[in-house]
């Protein structure tokens, strides 16, 4: 790996760490009877240690795992593409 690739990899790891530290959340309301539907509403982003408050006391809050997964896959794909674009072996490649 050359210096550019090391820099891209470091930046990619920092971005992924920040995405995991400040993930997306969703507010959920579970129906009390089968006649009513459960609901899920995007609740924004918040620190993993301090999630956002639910809209009211009848709602719960949880991680939006599907959206976080899409973000992580997109970041990994972008980082991989940039690593390939910055390819080539530099003087400091160790080989």
Image: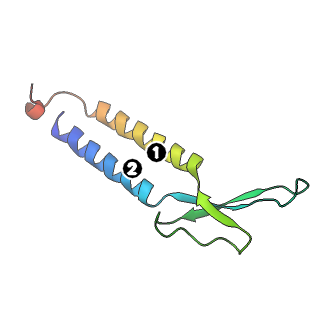
Q: Position of residue 24 (x, y in %)?
A: 54, 58
Q: Secondary structure at mark 2?
A: helix
Does residue 67 appear to the left or right of 77 in the view shown? right
Which picture quadrant has residue 91? top left
| Residue 59 placement, left or right of 76 | right
Q: Quadrant of residue 3?
A: top left
- The residue that label 2 is drawn on is 16
Cα–Cα span, label 1 and label 2: 7 Å
> Which residue is farthest top?
95
Residue 93: quadrant of the picture = top left
Mark 1 near mark 2, Cβ–Cβ under 8 Å? yes
Q: Residue 69 location, x and y as percent?
A: 52, 44
Local crowd size for mark 2, using a 10 Å CA cut-off: few (<14), some (14–19), many (≥20): some
Q: Residues within 10 Å of mark 1 (few under 14, many from 20)?
A: some
Q: State whether residue 1 is above or below residue 69.
A: above
Identify whether 49 is placed above or below 33: below
Question: Where, quadrant-wise, is the C terminus in this rendering?
Answer: top left
Residue 60 tag number: none
Location of mark 1 (residue)? 72
Q: From the viewer's perspective, tell me whether residue 93 is left or right of residue 6.
A: left
Find residue 14 and report its horizontal and vertical position in percent.
32, 53
The quadrant of the image that shows the N terminus is top left
Q: Closer to the camera, 57 or 68? A: 57
Task: Write the residue at 46% across / 45% down.
Answer: 72
| Lateral position of residue 3 relative to residue 19, left or right | left
Q: Position of residue 57 (x, y in %)?
A: 71, 75
Residue occupying the far bottom of the picture: 57
Q: In this orientation, which residue lies closer to the viewer: 2 or 58?
A: 58
- At x 76%, y 59%, the residue is 30
The answer to whether residue 36 is above or below residue 54 is above
Return the residue nearer the eye: 79 or 14. 14
Disc 1 secondary structure class:
helix
């Amino acid at each position: 790996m050359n210096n550019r690739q090391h820099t891209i990899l470091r930046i990619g790891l920092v971005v992924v760490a920040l995405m995991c530290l400040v993930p997306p959340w969703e507010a959920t309301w579970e129906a009390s009877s089968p006649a009513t539907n459960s609901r899920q509403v995007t609740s924004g982003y918040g620190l993993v240690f301090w999630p956002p408050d639910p809209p009211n006391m009848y709602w719960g809050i949880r991680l939006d795992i599907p959206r976080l997964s899409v973000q992580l896959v997109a970041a990994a794909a972008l980082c991989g593409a940039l690593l390939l674009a910055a390819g080539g072996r530099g003087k400091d490649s160790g080989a």
